[in-house]
Amino acid sequence: MFDWLQNFADWLIYSVFNVSAETHLGVALNFFIYDTIKILILLFFIVFVMGIVNAYFPIERLKDYLNKKKLYGLEYFFSSIFGAITPFCSCSSVPLFIGFVQGGIPLGVTFSFLITSPLVNEVAIAMFIGMFGIKATLIYAVSGILLGTIGGWILGKFNLEHLLSEWVKNILARKMEQAVYKEEQLTFYQRIPEITQSAWAIVKGVLVYVIIGIAIGAAMHGYVPENFFNDYLGGGEWWTVPLAVIVAVPMYANAAGIVPVIQVFVAKGVPLGTAIAFMMATVGLSIPEATLLKKVMSLKLIAIFFGVVTVAIIISGFLFNILL
Amino acid sequence: MSKVIKVLGTGCPKCKTMVSVVQDVISQHNIDASIEKVEDIMEIMKFNVMTTPALVIDDVITIKGRVPSKDEVLTLLN
């Protein structure tokens, strides 16, 4: 699919710039040009498609559905899928969280959404397809959704409602009236320009991270020796999984920046499972997210939430390494 | 009568875009309206919206979860 792009990169670096394919610099530059263009194309395409899905996603109806139907545990799964579909924007996660809880949806089900929302997002998916291919992306997305489902279910068992912030409890106590809402009527074609624009805005927003991430990746690719991590960091030892996850939790790297670096780790000998676990912990849990959640939850609840998800990610890291 | 416009959003890039779109429309067409940015999550939740940014004109929520075009805002204000 991207052969033409590889040809273009080869031509640009080896013929136009006249850097030899035999040198580290040549390989690194080629990798950088090819990956940057490929990722930007994928990114725009996926963000655009998700924009269309989102424009038509009936959030209110889903909320009512989850609230009214007896789903025998499937509600956690639906809520997790919903988290995967919504674009991750920390600023809308909190209102959605409150909207769910307020709508009578159990806290555990709401947590399923909250876990998956940053974990599986359109930028991470596009980067994963570009760097690891479709199969690894499916593994990442499916396990992210399962992790949200199971994590939410476990958190639901703990009965943590009393650990929400006071004002959230107050909102829950009195039934609030829905403010008057006049639904806008726009046709599909009227919406296209707006969806295109916001897709551009998202791509532009992550552009700098993509470039920095790929540049670091390209540099490492050309200069770090093969099997470096195996030889020096015990690439396959069992403790590398928890270590990678615990290092990654407080880190907040944009998915766009972290994936190209992880790809090099994998190319140089880190097991894919460890890398996926690292990625999940980086994008799924972060200090800025904790700060936002502080507004709706007590510190204790945030700690329990982060703890359960961290353990779940570590376990899935082990599973990936066994299964892959 | 002067219209009261509120833009609900916790300060994400989209919310800022919405404020500037609305401001542009008002100044270009000399519309008599006041814009208030509602950034406090507790205030936002009083409107019971789940997706931000949201546009509220005279206490009616007109747009949720997306940035409108200038034409759309103009139509909504007239």
Image: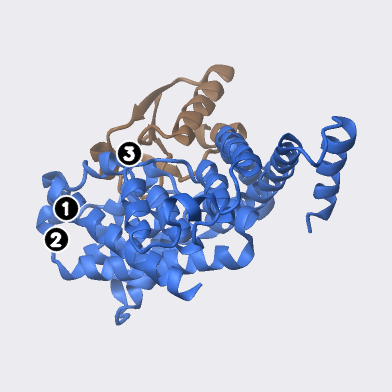
Chain colours: A blue, B brown
Q: Which residue is mark 2?
A: A160
- Looking at the rendered structure, whether the residues under marks 3 and 1 are on a common chain is answered as yes
Q: Is residue A161 left or right of residue B42?
A: left
Q: Amino acid at mark 3?
A: Pro
Q: Is residue A172 above or below residue A74?
A: above
Question: Percent x, y for residue A81?
Answer: 44, 66
Which element is circle 2 on? loop
Q: Chain of mark 2?
A: A
Within 10 Å of the Cα at label 2, are there few (<14), some (14-19), or many (20+) other Cα atoms? some
Which element is circle 3 on? helix
- The Cα–Cα distance between marks 1 and 2, rounded to whole angstroms, is 7 Å
Question: Percent x, y for residue A145?
Answer: 42, 66
Q: Are marks 1 and 2 in contact (CB under 8 Å)?
A: yes
Q: Amino acid at mark 1?
A: Leu
Q: Nearer the viewer, residue A182 or A229?
A: A229
Q: Amino acid at mark 2?
A: Leu
Task: Choose top left, top right, bottom left or bottom right for residue A319.
Answer: bottom left
Within 10 Å of the Cα at label 3, are there few (<14), some (14-19), or many (20+) other Cα atoms? few
